[in-house]
């Protein structure tokens, strides 16, 4: 049985691919690519001759059987247009089907536009919420933003150039004039990271229309004051005593305290361990 490799590819600069990624792409029997024309440019640059098949949003379900059949005989790689496959790109269904069929799935890490924008934004990176593309329709976009407006986490979205202005308007209207980093064309010749307030970003891109791939990194809600550690521990202990599971306790307190869920989960496990001693 073969292994399904999830291979991250450059988001702009072709030199950003890892040596291991190149080795995998050369040694697998087949590469399933979101856009074979885009992947062919990478292959031509690095003289990779592995056969390609298309695997995109409109044929991903029809291609499942073909890719799984290939895995029966040898290793297969999945790549997206750019960045890490299966992250806001086709791939989830394939990964799930491969795992259910008993195949190994192995990630080959590399470029990722959301993470690259986040770490260069100047905004907090210890707790963030990535939500992919903002909804297209204004009403749906505002509804979604309203649901997350009170969260203290840094927010990360993808956006298209032709929707950027309307998205910035809705972000400012619903979230207030928060800090934002608009990362455009990362790693490419015309890379731009505009840092400032939402109103400043709106003014900038109203005067200079944006082009290319865009990632938005937005400050979380600072108005929400996080609980003290003593408050958090007390609430966790109370929920555990009432029969809540570790996962339920962490989730409940995370919603009310402003603390990251994973931090609370570790705290719950420590509390349980102490109580068992």
Image: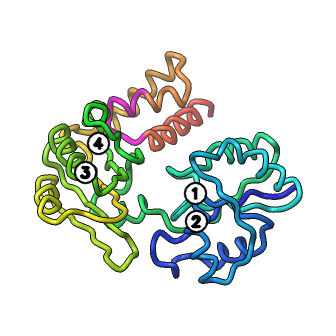
- Any part of residue 150 in sight: no
| Residue labelled with disc 2 | 8
Give the mark nearest the N terminus, 2 or 4. 2
Residue 259 part of the magenta segment:
yes
Give the mark nearest the N terminus, 4 or 3. 4
**SS assignment at label 3:** loop
Give the mark nearest the N terminus, 3 or 2. 2
Around disc 3, counting alpha carbons within 10 Å, would you say few (fewer than 14), some (14 to 19), or many (20 or more)?
many
**SS assignment at label 1:** loop
Question: What is the distance, in whole Å, between disc 4 and disc 3 at their CAs?
Answer: 8 Å
Locate residue 65 relative to residue 232 in the image: left or right.
Answer: right
Question: What is the distance, in whole Å, between disc 1 and disc 3 at their CAs?
Answer: 26 Å
Q: Nearer the viewer, mark 4 or mark 3?
A: 3
Question: What is the distance, in whole Å, between disc 3 and disc 2 at their CAs?
Answer: 27 Å
| Residue labelled with disc 1 | 85
Using the rendered view, name the quadrant where residue 203 is placed.
bottom left
Locate residue 201 relative to residue 190 in the image: left or right.
Answer: left
| Residue labelled with disc 4 | 152
Magenta-highlighted residues: 252-260
Q: Disc 1 vs disc 2: Cβ atoms closer than 8 Å? A: yes
Name the residue located 46 percent from the left edge and 78 percent from the top edge. Answer: 13
Question: What is the distance, in whole Å, between disc 1 and disc 2 at their CAs?
Answer: 6 Å
Around disc 4, counting alpha carbons within 10 Å, would you say few (fewer than 14), some (14 to 19), or many (20 or more)?
many
Can you give x and y, in whole percent of width and height, for residue 232 in the image? 37, 33
| Residue labelled with disc 3 | 219
Question: What is the distance, in whole Å, between disc 2 and disc 4 at their CAs?
Answer: 30 Å
Give the mark nearest the N terminus, 1 or 3. 1
């Amino acid at each position: 049985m073969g292994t399904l490799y999830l291979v991250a590819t450059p988001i702009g600069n072709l030199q950003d691919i890892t040596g291991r990624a190149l080795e995998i792409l050369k040694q697998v029997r087949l590469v399933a690519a979101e856009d074979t024309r885009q992947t062919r440019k990478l292959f031509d640059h690095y003289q990779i001759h592995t056969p390609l098949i298309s695997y995109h949003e409109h044929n991903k379900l029809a291609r499942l059987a073909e890719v799984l059949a290939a895995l029966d005989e040898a290793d297969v790689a999945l790549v997206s247009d750019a960045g890490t496959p299966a992250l806001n790109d086709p791939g989830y269904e394939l990964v799930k089907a491969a795992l259910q069929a008993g195949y190994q799935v192995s990630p080959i890490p590399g470029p990722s536009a959301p993470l690259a924008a986040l770490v260069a934004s100047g905004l907090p990176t210890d707790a963030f919420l990535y939500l992919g593309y903002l909804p297209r329709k204004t009403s749906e976009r505002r509804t979604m933003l309203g649901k997350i407006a009170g969260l203290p986490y840094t927010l990360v979205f993808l956006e298209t150039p032709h929707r950027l202005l309307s998205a910035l308007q809705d972000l400012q209207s619903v979230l207030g004039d928060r800090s934002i980093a608009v990362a455009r064309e990362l790693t490419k010749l015309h890379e731009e990271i505009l840092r400032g307030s939402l109103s400043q970003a709106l003014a900038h891109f109203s005067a200079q229309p944006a082009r290319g791939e865009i990632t938005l990194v937005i400050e979380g809600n600072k108005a929400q004051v996080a609980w003290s550690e003593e408050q958090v521990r007390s609430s966790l202990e109370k929920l555990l005593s009432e029969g809540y599971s570790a996962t339920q306790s962490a989730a409940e307190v995370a919603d009310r305290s402003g603390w990251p869920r994973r931090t609370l989960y570790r705290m719950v496990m420590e509390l349980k361990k102490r109580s068992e001693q």
